[in-house]
Image: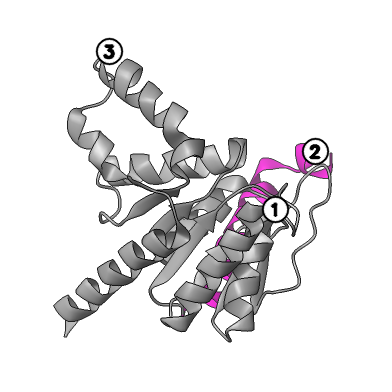
Amino acid sequence: MLDAKMPEAWRVLRIQSELVDGIERLITLKGAVTVFGSARFPEQAAEYQEAQRLGELLACEGVPVITGGGPGIMEACNRGAFCQSGESIGLSIELPHEQLPNAYLDINLNFRYFFVRKFMFVKHAMGFIAMPGGYGTLDELFEALTLVQTRKVRRFPIVLVGKQYWAGLVDWMRNTVLARGCIDADDLSLFTLVDTVDEAAQIIIEFIRECDGETQ
């Protein structure tokens, strides 16, 4: 409630401080991958185990991992990277039901504003991987797709892991959204649907290697 009563000018300064702090803390971060997914998967879930393996695969190739910093998929991916001595970053968000940062973070930034946090997700990302998740994951996925579609950012891989989980959404996009002319056929090529984290990691790693080759 404090924020609702805050004068607009002071709110702008708070937003500015989140931006400046985030940029300064992550200024040396290069070639990271942002991983989205539900906070609700427990450690024994198959999705948690897969996300942990994803973090390990990326860390072994020197690819920093960025997540939302919370539990579930986020914790698992951070855990995999952290235990392989890779760079593990969490961008936490203040929620009505407090969500504590997980224990596997080299860097944790806490945000009040979703749009500032989203900017940080994108700024250092060379690719996005979306694992099974809910509204937050869908929001972040479509934010990334929109930025690439409108060429506000350079095109990078956006990978959806779990064909069974995402099939309904992809079918709806093809059979309804595309059929009604709300997107173009090329827009469906902005993401790749895979079944395993091994496939997802390989797509990201190959893209980063190609980019590194272009800059040499």
- The dot on residue 180 is 3
Residue that numbered label 2 is attached to: 5
Residue that numbered label 1 is attached to: 45
* Marks 2,1: beta carbons within 8 A: no
Foreground label between 1 and 3: 1
Q: Of helix, strand and loop, which one carries label 3? A: loop
| Residue 16 among those drawn in magenta | yes
- Graded by Cα atoms within 10 Å as few (under 14), some (14 to 19) or many (20 or more), the crowding at tag 3 reads few
Q: Of helix, strand and loop, which one carries label 2? A: helix
In which quadrant will I find the C terminus? bottom left
- Camera-side residue of 132 and 115: 132
- Camera-side residue of 144 and 40: 40
Q: Label 1 amino acid?
A: Ala
How would you classify the magenta stretch by its main secondary structure?
A: helix
> Horizontally, is 115 left or right of 39 in the view?
left
Residue range (magenta):
1-28
User: Which quadrant would residue 174 be assigned to in this image?
Assistant: top left
Q: Name the residue: 27% across, 21% down.
A: 178
Res 64 seen here: no
- The CA distance from mark 3 to mark 2 is 43 Å
- The CA distance from mark 2 to mark 1 is 42 Å
- The dot on residue 18 is none
Q: Name the residue: 77% across, 37% down.
A: 4
In which quadrant will I find the N terminus? top right
> Horizontally, is 176 left or right of 99 in the view?
left
